[in-house]
Amino acid sequence: MNESLVSAYKDILSSRGLNYHYLSLPAVGDKPTLLFVHGFPSTSYEWYHQINYFSERGFGVVAPDMLGFGGTSKPTDTSLFLHTAIAQDLLDILDAEKVQRAIAVGHDWGSFIVSILSIKHSDRFSGFAYVAVTYNIPVPFPPLDVTLEMQTKTYGRPLSGYWKFFEQESAPSIIEKNLESFISVLYPDDPDSWLTLINQPGETQAFVESGKMMKRASYLTDEHHSHLLESLRKGGLTSPLNWYWFKLKGIDSHIMEEIPKENLFIKKPMFFAAARKDHVCIYDYAVLEMEKYAQGGLKTVVFQRGHWIHLEEPETFNMELEGWIRDTL
């Protein structure tokens, strides 16, 4: 990230009293503003390729550190991670910046929050973009063992085996003691390593506890790697893992009761950067979900990459996203 952008960070107390640390750059002229929503285990820094690219072209940019990460509050109360409440936190930021309408771009857990924004607050956005992780309906989460069994029956293997590690009370301390090993698993040079280390129950924990190291991905620069380590060492993993515990504890089980069924079908334009080598949010499932619920137009761009498309192939991703904005919105 350009040094000049560091001074563009601000802090705000959301309407429910949580501090959010976020980058804000105003749009030039009639250019739209992009709201970038990251996932686990990142901060807003993860979007540095996009922040530089779009701000240099006059787009407005708002990029918060999400709850539990970076300079934002790190609560341990899992109920505070309710996705509808986090979506409102982001609207509080847009209100503070006097952004009446934006384009939301989400990755990983950020895609879940963008999904809520598209369902409940579509009037505040011109379009919605999803990176690797598809649009998600906030349905209740079955017991984890049932989920893994269903995945195995459908896809021939479990997809979310690493959740068996994350659900444990000891997970934060294990990860904190072996942080570099953990980061090497999440940002591997070979995305196919996830077929074992992420998909299969027990593998993530065994690898991380042993302190082993995967070859670091070339797209994870020294600066970005250092930022990740510093941020997670400072803030710890207890608060970030609430993104998973929230689902596992069923805290969102009532959300669907508040949503009319017709609102699940999104009438604003949607963009999907699909990752052929994301072995958790797998391509076939992800594309079908997008096509099922996108009623306002959908542009899908397929990348022969893993989970971190916007880091692995930023030039192509940025140009495709900008092209979609130019041609559609």
Image (cartoon, rainbow, N blue to C red):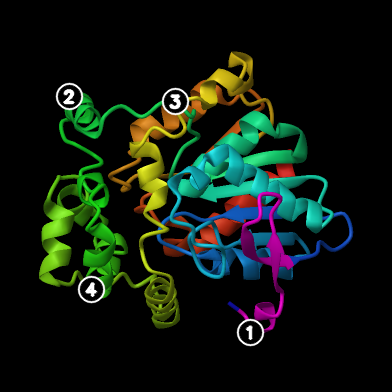
Q: Is residue 171 above or below residue 299?
A: below
* Mark sitting earlier along the chain (1/3): 1
Dot 3 crowding, Cα within 10 Å, few <14, some 14–19, many 20+: some
Q: Residue at position x 36%, y 50% from top?
A: 304
Q: Is residue 200 above or below residue 46?
A: above
Residue 126 picture location, percent across and down: 74, 39
> Where's the N terminus, which quadrant?
bottom right
Dot 1 crowding, Cα within 10 Å, few <14, some 14–19, many 20+: few
What's the CA distance linking mark 2 and mark 3? 20 Å
Q: Secondary structure at mark 4?
A: helix
* Mark sitting earlier along the chain (3/4): 3
Q: Is residue 157 above or below residue 97?
A: above
Residue 249 picture location, percent across and down: 35, 36
Q: Which residues are magenta?
A: 2-24
Q: Which residue is mark 3?
A: 139
- The dot on residue 3 is 1
Residue 299 picture location, percent across and down: 58, 37
Q: Verify CB contact (< 8 Å) between mark 4 and mark 2.
A: no
- The dot on residue 153 is 2
* Mark sitting earlier along the chain (4/1): 1
* Mark sitting earlier along the chain (2/3): 3
What's the CA distance linking mark 3 and mark 4? 34 Å
Q: Residue at position x 72%, y 55% from top?
A: 93
Lateral position of residue 228 relative to residue 209, left or right: right
Q: Amino acid at mark 2?
A: Lys
Q: Which residue is mark 4?
A: 177
Residue 13 lies within the magenta run: yes
Q: Amino acid at mark 3?
A: Val
